[in-house]
Image (cartoon, helix red, strand yellow):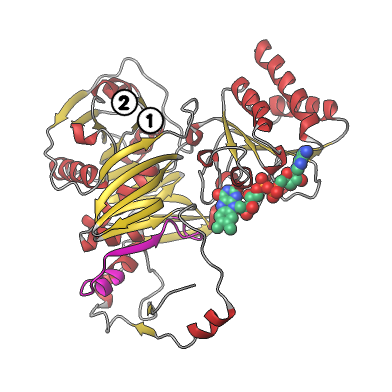
Amino acid sequence: MSKKVLVLAEARDGELRNVSFEVIAAGKKIAGDGGEVYALLVGDGVGSFSDALIKQGADQVLVAEHADLKTYTTDAYKQVLLQVIEEQSPDALLIPHTSSGKDLAPRLAAKLSSGLVSDIIDIELAGDEVVFTRPIYSGKAFEKKSVTGGMLFATVRPNNIAALDEDASRSGDTKDVSVELKDLRSIIKDVVKKTSGKVDLAEAKVIVAGGRGVKSAEGFEPLEELADILGGAVGASRGACDAEYCDYSLQIGQTGKVVTPELYIAVGISGAIQHLAGMSNSKVIVAINKDAEAPIFDVADYGLVGDLFDILPILTDEFKKVKAGA
Amino acid sequence: MGADKAVLLDTEDLEDDVDHYTISEMLNAFFKDKEYDIILGGNVAVDDGAGQVAPRLAELLDINQVTTITKLDIEGTKATIERDVEGDVEVVETELPLLVTCQQGLNEPRYPSLPGIMKAKKKPLETLDLDDLGLDEDELEAKTKTVDRFLPPEKQAGKKLEGEPAQQVEELIKLLKTEAKVI
Ligand SMILES: Cc1cc2nc3c(=O)[nH]c(=O)nc-3n(C[C@H](O)[C@H](O)[C@H](O)COP(=O)(O)OP(=O)(O)OC[C@H]3O[C@@H](n4cnc5c(N)ncnc54)[C@H](O)[C@@H]3O)c2cc1C
């Protein structure tokens, strides 16, 4: 049976996040033949992203703009979503499992008295039933869940469900949603940028992460160089953040960011369970550590045992050559 | 750790499918007739990792929420909060009553001291079941179903590369190109 799926797109720092395309791809799968995916843009001055969403597979784009939607707040976004759900009566709703999606989705689910499957990484169709896969126990195991009450509703972990290929010939309608917001209880006084804004860690294809073994803030510079060459981002263990080698915004793990890059290079990181929680599902893991017994090697596809200060410069040079040759 | 009173909401009467809907409804039934200024919750549970219960509860109680907070200042009924937004820090102002979820950095939990542990034994622990909460099993039926739980396919044991740094790097680049095909 074909379905009407509403997906929430997300912009950050004036750019559409890739996860927006991934929720569209996920939505297409659920919608089935003859079904439709409606992408919702919420913000202030976000209408221009509509075209990109259509080329990536959205059948229709809904744009809700308001000065009070510039920065995410629970109350404002909740009101927009409830209004759009009321007007559109979708069969399914997909929201990115990002900072704002995590804040919003459970609240909506409670309001709609609906089930919700959080942080999904895969979707299967079993006849008419939609089954979601999600990691549990910090990525050490997985579960398959379906929604049995309320709306078919899930949040989607970035970097796991592949976006569709762009199709420039696609066309679709864009409709404005006029919103009135009331009783907004949170006022955002300030947003202090800690992330460099170069490459979004959650969406990076390559991550070079440093741990306490890197030994100093200066020790992170070669990691940045390597990340730049690979078009990736720099991450860190909590050990490195606690030692003030880098900002907490780089922390990967249970209490930091959860990432799924194609290539994760762990440099001077021991591989504590709380760190693994954030990166063990990376597609390929390379570890550089001088301790051959370090637990990071248990999850690494390729392990380099040795002093990172010897290995890193050679590695960087070799990657430079590869990139120059490509 | 410092709590003055503890209450256990007992799910024993329920079948095994207890989900975030169920738990948040039970918490709602508990809080409904209580007075509170602030409800503090965890950010996510380490086993399930969904982070649904606290925001669901805030919605059911119709109070505001601020999630993943790293700093909390309260003056009268005004709360000034810093929250972690994927690494950036957002400064939020809002009013009580309020629900917050706590993120690493909010504070250093104290270690329970021996006298503390002794004292804790004398503190009241109340256990409430569905009847006490005025709830009926049927209203609490989970809205999601777990179809399967499984371990990831056994990962091929990783390769430890041998030799001098230059040899290891050479081997790595080759493997990343031909075997892993990521570069
Ligand atoms: C509730 C809780 C939540 C947590 N959340 C997180 C989280 O989100 N993320 C996280 O990362 N941690 C988290 N932790 C902390 C975690 O338990 C570890 O303490 C932390 O990951 C260790 O960081 P590290 O690997 O950099 O340091 P270490 O464990 O000290 O490891 C340093 C490694 O560097 C190697 N090394 C040293 N010098 C060199 C050299 N010259 N060349 C090569 N290798 C070298 C050493 O052999 C060692 O393996 C959490 C802990 C708790 C209790």
Check residue A111 for magenta coloring.
Answer: no
- B27, A147: nearer the viewer: B27
In which quadrant is the C terminus of chain A drawn?
top right
Q: For mark 2, name the chain.
A: A
Question: Residue at point 65% right, 15% down?
Answer: A323
Residue type of the residue flagged with mark 2: Leu
Q: CA distance from mark 2 to mark 1?
A: 7 Å
Check residue B37 for magenta coloring.
Answer: yes
Instruction: In the rendered structure, find residue A53 and report the number of the disc placed on it.
Output: 2
Q: Outermost residue toward the bottom? A: B122
Residue type of the residue flagged with mark 1: Phe
Vertical comparison of A171 with A106: above or below:
above
Q: Is mark 1 within 8 Å of ligand 1?
A: no
In which quadrant is the N terminus of chain A drawn?
top left
Q: Position of residue B149 (x, y in %)?
A: 51, 59
The reply to whether residue B72 is in sight is yes
Q: Outermost residue toward the right? A: B163
Q: Position of residue B59 (x, y in %)?
A: 24, 58
Left or right, B5 with reference to A37: right
| Span highlighted in magenta in the image | B26-49
- A241, A235: nearer the viewer: A241
Instruction: In the rendered structure, find residue A21 and report the number of the disc placed on it.
Output: 1
Q: Secondary structure at mark 1?
A: helix
Report which quarter residue A268 is drawn in. top right
Report which quarter residue B21 is drawn in. bottom left
